[in-house]
Amino acid sequence: MAEPVETIVAADILVNAVGEIAQHEIADMHPFPICHTCLRTSHSLGWCELVADIWNMIQETSYSPADATKAITYFRSLIETRTFKKEQLREERVITYLNCLSWAASHGPTPLRLEALSVLGKAAEVSVPIAAAVKPVISRSLMQSPPHTGEWGNADDRYYFAKAVSVSMGEWTGRYAARELALAGTSEVRSKEVWAELALTNCASIAEAITEIAAGLNSSDASAAEDPLTPFRRLTRACDSLIGPLRASELPAGSGLGAALRSMFSLPPVSHTSEFVKAREATALSAIDLIITILRLRAETLFEQDMYRAVSVPLGWWKPATPPLVIDERANRVANLAVDALLIVARQGHRDVELRRAIAAALGSKRVDEIASKKATADPGLLPEISYWLSTGRDLQAASRNETLGELLDQEMDELIARLAIERRRFEMTPSDIRQIGDDIEAFEPVHASTIKNVGTHLDVLGQSIDTMLRKRGILVSPERDETIRYDPRSHEASKPMATSTEARVVVPGAIKSSPGRPPVILVKAIVK
């Protein structure tokens, strides 16, 4: 269980100050809840006020850097030889050196302060009881933001310094961790993982964390690197370190995330050496993978135009050449996510024109059109004009129509349908007659009988379709075959010269179209004799 820092760090003073009560707390190692910000307790208000006074005494105690160096050396030896046990927390020497480390972590020179925090962070990893004693010391020493590490220490020192900072709950922790993540050495892996997790845990949003990382990568400290490939390697490490914690983070995306990513990816040009080509490809992969992770985990970012403009930054590192296939595949994944976002809006009958335009400009019109066309074709529920817009980015133009030409085309169609109906009427047999023939020969020719009956059935269906078209277009077959009429050259066609009004018999029926509000139109003249 957590042992308050006051019980350990100031144990010798507390014993003399509070007598048997304090001795009981220390001897039995029973913790009591303390708020390390206000030093208030639900157990004993008087006890914590005394502890606060004692802590102030400790802070005012005069230690020298030499004392702190001794304390650091002592604790390093205990940790490295694995001889640091919880029983030693009661020893006067350990208590004194903890007090000294507390002073160094709070008030020492920058290198000494960083080293003291690193040692305390490493000590907190030894065991749970020691962590319970050390973490309050770290927390009190980190009431204010520590200096940045810069070039201080090796990878191991910086990792345990990061572990120490992870104890703090200060408001500065997230921004500080983001800046350290940006400036960490390219060979560091463990400390970057800690900084990434701290940044995404303590910042207000992903956008805030990315903004701080971008500021660190673009700072004078980062640009002063001797190796021109260092900025690319730092960006690669930063992106790779963020992806894991992002999958488990509930941090909101925040506003301006796309713009922050664009700033983060803005790197200076470098000569096209073979080493640079490899570093550029690795960095572009990490950068685009980070964007893909954010787009998949935070749906609202799919509709942010700057997210796709951020993708265009690493893609532009190859201009005017073409990126490698592996980079192109990543760009296709982003394009698929982007088109899915457009499709969500399109299914509701809306068009986000600005978003599609930004996606096409960032990822290439050809790529976006091909992917969008496939998705639009596979979704029959889209309106025709929406489907066309999604596929091409352009509005579907209404077909220009000449009214006179339209009427002529309609009349030709009516005439074709009328002739089809007339030819059916000229057929001597009905579908029922054909089916009856099939039934009659079935005993002798079963195979052919089945074919004949199928013909009858299909003719029946054809007749129903023709009747439907006739009703829909207002066409009437008239006069009927064998009907007696008075010859009229405007409506009839005679097989030989005939006087008007002469009685005649219809040989081939005619067809008339009736439209509301308009006179009947003769589509096909009946043939009479």
Image (cartoon, helix red, strand yellow):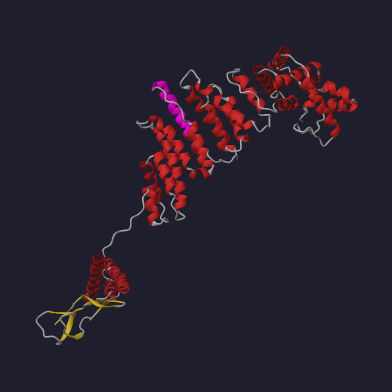
> Is residue 86 in the magenta section?
no
Figure check: 382 above or below 102 = below
Residue at 58% across, 28% down: 179
Q: What span is in magenta? A: 272-287
Residue 284 visible in the current orientation? yes
Figure check: 368 above or below 432 = above
Residue 480 falls left or right of residue 81: left
> Is residue 274 in the magenta section?
yes
Residue 377 visible in the current orientation? no
The secondary structure that most of the magenta stretch takes on is helix
Towards the viewer: 181 or 244 = 181
* Place of residue 369 in the rendered image (x, y in percent of width and height, measured from the top left): 37, 45
Q: Which quadrant of the view contains residue 522?
A: bottom left
Figure check: 334 above or below 75 = below
If the image is split into quadrants, where does the C terminus sit? Answer: bottom left
* Place of residue 193 in the rendered image (x, y in percent of width and height, measured from the top left): 58, 28
